[in-house]
């Protein structure tokens, strides 16, 4: 699996289209009236993969979410402040989560975690607690995104501390929001104030992270 960490320095949409957030980046690009966002996204992926933009296709998964593919590669996009993550894998579905580490924790920050996870976090040094919980959250979110529409209300039921071989995380069934299953989750190297994780539908022997600076050359 390859993950591209892209520092987005290209210009905003000329008509003031709002920057899409999270994994809705590709979906929101469909509604940009000037067409710059989808063009840039396809050009960016083509540039990274050394292929023609015509080979980068927008599709919908079984839940209606916008997906990208290029040949046999499945791709997912996740946006954070000032940057963009793109993961691609051959023969496996992938999902990403990235989150900024908060400066402090309020009561809401503990809601996605079960009793064992809360106990582990409370036993950690206070200075490391926010980063720890944020990393665990990205693991949960990536796994839930991979296996269903999200089902984020069920995050506390996803145990990321007892991950099995190759990072296997079991996601329980979440009713109409998702069928559950197993996600193979890995943490990604990031800056100290950010946490990120990637989930795949099959075990991945190696994940290579590339740091790339834009602007990306975008043709007409």
Image (cartoon, helix red, strand yellow):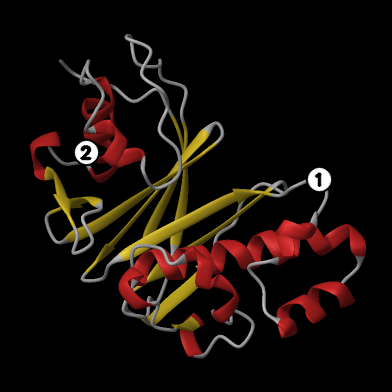
Residue at image x 35%, y 77%? 175
Disc number lying in front (2 or 1): 1
Q: Residues within 10 Å of mark 2 (few under 14, many from 20)?
A: some
Tell me whether the residue at label 2 lies in contact with that at label 1, contact meaning CB atoms closer than 8 angstroms. Answer: no
| Front-most of residues 159 and 8 | 159
Residue at image x 67%, y 73%? 113
User: x%, y% of residue 167?
Assistant: 50, 81
Could you tell me which secondary element the residue under label 1 belongs to? loop
Is residue 187 placed above or below 175 in the rendered structure?
Answer: above
- Looking at the image, residue 167 sits to the left or right of residue 203; the answer is right
The earlier-in-sequence mark between 2 and 1 is 2
Residue at image x 44%, y 60%? 208
Disc number for residue 216: none
Is residue 13 placed above or below 54 in the rendered structure?
Answer: above
- Looking at the image, residue 23 sits to the left or right of residue 160; the answer is left
Q: Which quadrant of the view contains residue 57?
A: top left
- C-alpha distance separating marks 2 and 1: 37 Å
- Residue holding disc 1: 103
Q: Residues within 10 Å of mark 1 (few under 14, many from 20)?
A: few
| Front-most of residues 196 and 142 | 142
User: x%, y% of residue 170?
Assistant: 46, 85
Is residue 67 placed above or below 54 in the rendered structure?
Answer: below
- Looking at the image, residue 144 sits to the left or right of residue 29; the answer is right
Residue at image x 22%, y 35%? 42
Q: Residue furthest front?
A: 176
User: x%, y% of residue 164?
Assistant: 52, 90
Disc number for residue 46: 2
Q: Which quadrant holds the C terminus?
A: top left
């Amino acid at each position: 699996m390859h993950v591209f960490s892209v520092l987005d320095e290209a210009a905003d949409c000329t008509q003031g289209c709002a920057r899409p957030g999270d994994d809705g980046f590709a979906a929101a690009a469909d509604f940009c009236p000037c067409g710059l966002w989808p063009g840039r996204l396809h050009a960016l992926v083509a540039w990274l993969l050394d292929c023609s933009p015509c080979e980068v296709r927008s599709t919908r998964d079984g839940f209606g979410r916008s997906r990208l593919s290029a040949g046999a590669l499945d791709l997912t996009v996740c946006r954070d402040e000032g940057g963009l993550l793109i993961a691609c894998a051959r023969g496996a579905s992938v999902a990403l989560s990235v989150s900024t580490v908060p400066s402090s924790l309020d009561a809401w920050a503990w809601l996605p975690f079960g009793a064992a996870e809360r106990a582990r976090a409370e036993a950690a040094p206070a200075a490391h607690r926010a980063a720890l919980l944020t990393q665990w959250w990205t693991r949960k979110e990536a796994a839930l995104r991979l296996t269903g529409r999200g089902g984020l209300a069920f995050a506390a039921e996803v145990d990321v501390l007892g991950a099995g071989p190759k990072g296997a995380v079991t996601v329980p069934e979440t009713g109409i929001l998702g069928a559950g299953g197993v996600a193979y989750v890995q943490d990604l190297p990031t800056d100290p104030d950010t946490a990120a994780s990637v989930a795949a539908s099959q075990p991945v022997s190696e994940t290579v992270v590339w740091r790339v600076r834009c602007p990306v050359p975008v043709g007409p």
